[in-house]
Amino acid sequence: MLETLGAALAALHFAAPLAYYAAAKRWLKTPWRLRRDHTYTPTVTVAIPTYNEAGHIEEKLDDVYRQDYPRDKLEIIVVDSASTDGTAERAKRWAEAHPDLNLKIIREPERRGKAAALNKALAEARGEIFVITDADCRWPQRDAIRRAASLFADPAVGAVTCLKKPTADGPAGVEAGYRSRYNLLRLAESKKWSTPVFHGELAAYRTELLRKIGGFPPDVGADDSHTATKIALDGHRAIAAEDLWCVEAVPRDGYHRWRIRRAQHLIQHLAKTPLRRAPPSMRPILAAEKYLHLANPWLLPAAAALMAISATPAALTLMAAGAALLALRPYRTWVVAQLYLMAAAARNLWNKELVWEKQRK
Ligand code: GDD
Ligand code: MN
């Protein structure tokens, strides 16, 4: 009895994501149903939040400077939250050396988190499109802003994000496999309607919609995803663009802490997103993502516990098989991600990590 229940939970744990993946592959084959215009160049504000980014800020500003976008339509706002490593001074020196770029630096006297900093930039933004980008990521494409902007030619689009390439594989070679699966899901969801997962490496929003939803949430770590999803719940599309790439820096140390913190933020975001307000085409996406991130991971230890208690030969064989499969990379990647999600859910009970430690990249 226990053994059967355990096996059923394990089967559900693996079948649910596979079923969602199969649905996503079907969505991926459907058309975008969007009108994109590559000559569309609205005014753009690029906001760069920084906390101790002295090692990255100049390269980041160079990236933005290299963008092939009309200069007179581009405004950059760096919001530095009391960095102690001279980030703001470096940004200031860079600005003096590049007077042809409209760059403003806001210095917060104390650190109150990324969302609060972005809201400062939003209050001063003059662009029709508000782009956020982390200081420690790279834009390999010179037309990144142009590509993102071209999608806003369609009034249905409220937010646009990039796909991600990691610079280095994490321990156990987990990061790259996780990313390719993730990118496929983001695109499929975007084609169906909207993706609830956005990336702070490049997330672009219609400024008026951001203001309408009250800016970035100070109580949800995944500020990028949460704002995009709110915009999608309001009936606009929040999409990942298939030809927009960002390179994200993977930390040299503290990799597990980093993954857990980001999982914590994603959980906060999905837990706070109400399903009932979702437009019909968004509902299956949100329901699946909520289930997969909030409930499904826990079926794994529940199944293992039931089988261990029952201790029948069949149950023990199944458990041994489950352990042996860890030699296979996609399976191992999956199991590791479940462990991060469970650790993150537990950690959210005492520390939401809304203001987090800066990891060296
Ligand atoms: N101004 C300001 N104030 N900026 C901050 C603060 C703050 O208190 N905290 C972090 N930042 C800046 C960092 O300097 C960086 O430019 C960006 O926000 C992202 O922070 P990282 O420390 O690099 O975090 P990450 O690499 O894990 O970022 C990813 O996860 C976050 C959520 O967990 C990205 O996707 C982020 O966009 C996302 O917010
Ligand atoms: Mn980062």
Image (tube, rainbow, N blue to C red):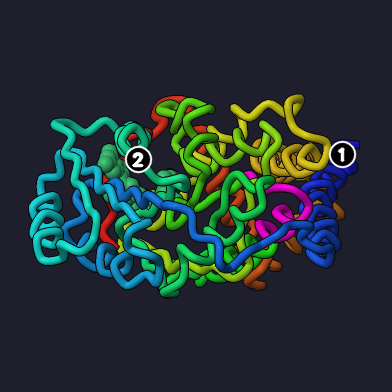
Secondary structure state at the residue bearing disc 1? helix
For image coordinates 39% across by 72% down, the residue present is: 68
Foreground label between 1 and 2? 2
Q: How far apart are labels 1 and 2 at the CA level?
A: 55 Å
Q: Which residue is mark 2?
A: 125
Disc with the residue nearer the chain's start (1 vs 2): 1
Res. 71 in view = yes
Question: Tag 2: Cα neighbours inside 10 Å, few (<14), some, or many (≥20)?
Answer: some
Provide the major secondary structure of the magenta segment: helix
State which quarter of the image contains the C terminus: bottom left
Instruction: Indicate yes or no whether the magenta region holds residue 195.
Output: yes
Instruction: Indicate yes or no whether the magenta region holds residue 105.
Output: no
Q: Provide residue 204's location: percent of width, then percent of height.
A: 49, 50
Q: Provide residue 126's location: percent of width, then percent of height.
A: 36, 42
Is 68 situated above or below 93? below
Label 2 residue near ligand 1, CB within 8 Å: no
Secondary structure state at the residue bearing disc 2? loop
Question: Tag 1: Cα neighbours inside 10 Å, few (<14), some, or many (≥20)?
Answer: some
Range shown magenta: 185-196
State which quarter of the image contains the N terminus: top right
- Is 291 on the left-hand or right-hand side of 223? right
Query: Which residue type carries mark 2?
Result: Ala
Is 238 situated above or below 187? above
For image coordinates 59% across by 71% down, the residue present is: 243
- Is 68 on the left-hand or right-hand side of 181? left
Quarter occupied by residue 300: top right
Q: Provide residue 341's location: percent of width, then percent of height.
A: 57, 44
Q: Which mark is residue 5?
A: 1
Which is more toward the observer, 354 or 223? 223
Which is more toward the observer, 223 or 297? 223
For image coordinates 66% across by 38% down, the residue present is: 232
